[in-house]
Image (spheres, rainbow, N blue to C red):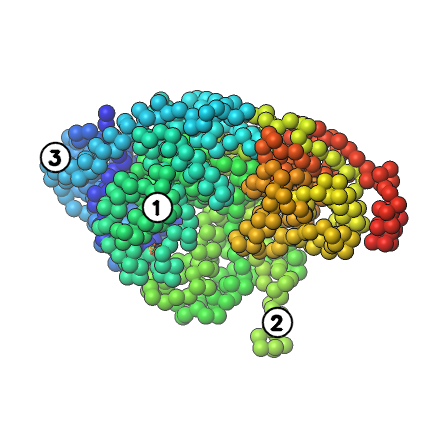
Amino acid sequence: MRYVVAVRALCEFTAKQGDLDLRFTPSPSAQEGIAGHALVASRRGALYQAEVSLSGDYKELRVRGRADGYDAQNRQLEEVKTFRGDLADMPENHRQLHWAQVKVYGWLLCQKLELAEVRLALVYLDIGSQQETVLAECFTAEALKGYFEAQCEKFLDWARQELAHRAARDAALAALAFPHAAFRTGQRELAEAVYRSAASSRCLMAQAPTGIGKTIATVFPLLKAAPRQHIDKVFFLAAKTPGRRLALDALALINRSAPTLPLRIIELVARDKACEHLDKACHGESCPLARGFYDRLPAARSAALAEPGAGGLLDKEALRTVALAHGVCPYYLSQDLVRWSDVVVGDYNYYFDVSALLHGLTVANGWRVSVLVDEAHNLVDRARKMYSAELDQAELAGVRQSAGPALKKPLDRLHRAWRDLARGPQHPPEQAYQVCDSPPDKFLLALQQATAAITDDLEAHPTRVDAALQRFYFDALHFSRIAESFGAHSLFDITLDDARVRNGPFGSSRPAARFSRLCIRNVVPAPFLAPRFAAARSAALFSATLSPQKYHADTLGLPADTAWVDVPSPFLAEQLAVQVVSDISTRYQHREGSLAPIAHLMARQYDDKPGNYLVFLSSYDYLEKLAERFRQLHPQVPIWQQTRRMDEAARDEFLARFVPEGRGIGFAVLGGAFAEGIDLPGQRLIGAFIATLGLPQVNPVNEQIKLRMAENFGARQAYDYTYLYPGIQKVVQAAGRVIRTTRDQGVIFLMDDRFARPQVQRLLPSWWQVRQMRLRPASVTDADRRVWVSADGVQP
Ligand code: SF4
């Protein structure tokens, strides 16, 4: 069996030495990189071949890759690198790596074309000036062969142990048994669907109820499928930290159940969670863990793989221990270890974001990967954020004020372009919210010139710390990058920010400045996500709320042959009483009047069956009003409230009130921290009151999103895709907190007349038996009547 390795991966393993250094950045955007390569190719003669596929074998190794270009006329093989800034600042170990790559390609080319010698060239293209710096040298085939074989020899021991690991892993996975005594109801059906999707190389959408053990039911079948389907890696992608933890626990359970299974499992966490020196920069002159990073990496890598942490996991803690023992950065060690892992557990952004690590490595190395997307109903919103960008004029103003002379001109030019943009003929300056066709070229050019100037400035002053300038710089780079792929999937809008209208300087009589924010707002992430799904051998997206199937498939860009499974709930309708209260309206204009009836219903239910309840409202404002009214009317009932910007400790405190024998009502916001992803089984939660349909607010932005939805999917879908489906999904998620096991009993009150509409009821889980009730006048008592009259001043 051969071990296949990409040229770049081979050279990174064998030829990278010295410090980790992120200061010398290549071209800021992938598109600029592609355009730079195309520019170099266009300057060459007719016989120039771009993207030359090459491969060659050495003992158990197969080395393959694509050289950037070959000029047959001059017998010159080129490796093209785009960059910004001063080439002299490029660290020496970067240049060494580039030479290593082009030399390996050189031998593969000589072998393929039977050349006795070849000229190798590193072509550095300055993205700003479009000037090329060419470093070229002639090599004999013999010398290149020697170099190639030396690199292969350096890698061979590692490759042999990787082959042995793979064989042992696959043998153990083939014999792997389900780690529990039996499947729970629905678990087998989900596991089989995931296995089939991997076997047929398709995507799968799986709607499966909470409580059946979805994590193990998705991870286990993929691991079983891995040997036959030659799956190199499984990526488990979660929206939130608890999802990652559940996955790691499930994988540790699998590891424990099969002691001979040599599965390598790694957790990826965000840089700010893994960094040991948050006050430092990622280069050897600043951070001790970056200094000599590549010299100490091999020992750290071997130690991590040989001795993972508890449960056989390389989770955050285990990685930190190994990294610090070897004096390397834990964050960048984890990025290296991805290459040698079988299962990677991380956030969505590691695969779906603009320049996501896992996706980039998958494409570069030709890995066969299977992707699991946990709680996939979150992916639409998360992906929208990844492909949106915002710029704040107030930040530009601040940066202009403190900028040095080198930045004055480009920032002034950007300021003028911005001002013209907001005052364009079609956009009167006083319009608070405007949507434009696309970001204008003139503005984008000014933005690019400004970022190029800041790049140079930052490189010229590496020790200067200017947090505002850096923040603006990264926002501007992201904005430029997102603007490159602007299309019908996004909006470009300008918002005048009333709250930040500025007075003239020092109380002068100069007119106040009104700042604006520019936003490229992704509405439909499908065009960005579709290539990500295509790059995976299979992908399974699972959640308790993936209905309607078409809405998710359309917005996420899933392929037409995506399979669908709706796993029946293991819960019985008798476990859950679902009541639609059809004579309460929670519409904005009726909220004040709804407070007393809602409070009354909650108190009555609490009196009938004391225990722990949650009530969900559409906003903090509504929550605070209801809590206040409830406290006035029913002071004997203990209540506790979710508040804005709760930290982790405060969230834990809120949840700690839900003890098995406890009593009281927690007030929470729909769509917030307590509306999904929390587990309160048994008596810890016996009911929920949901006083909202969860519909996004009708405002100018959402109305524009609706128009975009109409353009993409037709006018008939526009309202549902913008308002109804996202809203009801949140309701079902929140309601899903009540029944967590087959022994739970509970009650849900859906408090709004619109829950009685057939188009809404169709979106509720099929196992629910929904009943309608009217709170008044039939059920009203004299005591109730007195409460409402005194609270609202009106008769019910
Ligand atoms: S420890 Fe922090 S500053 Fe140092 S290299 Fe790692 S991420 Fe960068």
Q: Judge depth for marks 2 and 3 and give the one in front.
A: 2
Q: Mark on residue 116?
A: 3
Query: What residue is shown at x 84% (from left), y 50% (from top)?
Result: 787
Name the amino acid type tagged 3. Ala
The spot of residue 240 in percent (x, y) is: 50, 44
Task: Decide: is 787 above or below 416.
Answer: above
Q: CA distance from mark 1 to mark 3?
A: 50 Å
Q: Where on the image, by quarter, is ligand 1?
A: bottom left
> Which residue lies under the disc numbered 1?
318
The spot of residue 376 in percent (x, y) is: 53, 36
Image quarter (top left, top right, bottom left or bottom right) of the N terminus = top left
Q: Nearer the viewer, residue 467 or 420?
A: 467
Q: Nearer the viewer, residue 327 or 337?
A: 327
Task: Decide: is 10 above or below 642.
Answer: above
Q: CA distance from mark 1 to mark 2?
A: 53 Å
Of callouts 1 and 2, which one flags the residue occurring earlier in the amino acid sequence?
1
Dot 2: element: loop
Whether tag 1 and tag 2 are in contact, CB under 8 A, the answer is no
Name the amino acid type tagged 1. Ala
The crowd level at tag 2 (other Cα within 10 Å; few <14, some 14-19, many 20+) is some
Mark 2 residue CB less than 8 A from any atom of ligand 1:
no
> Which residue lies under the disc numbered 2?
503
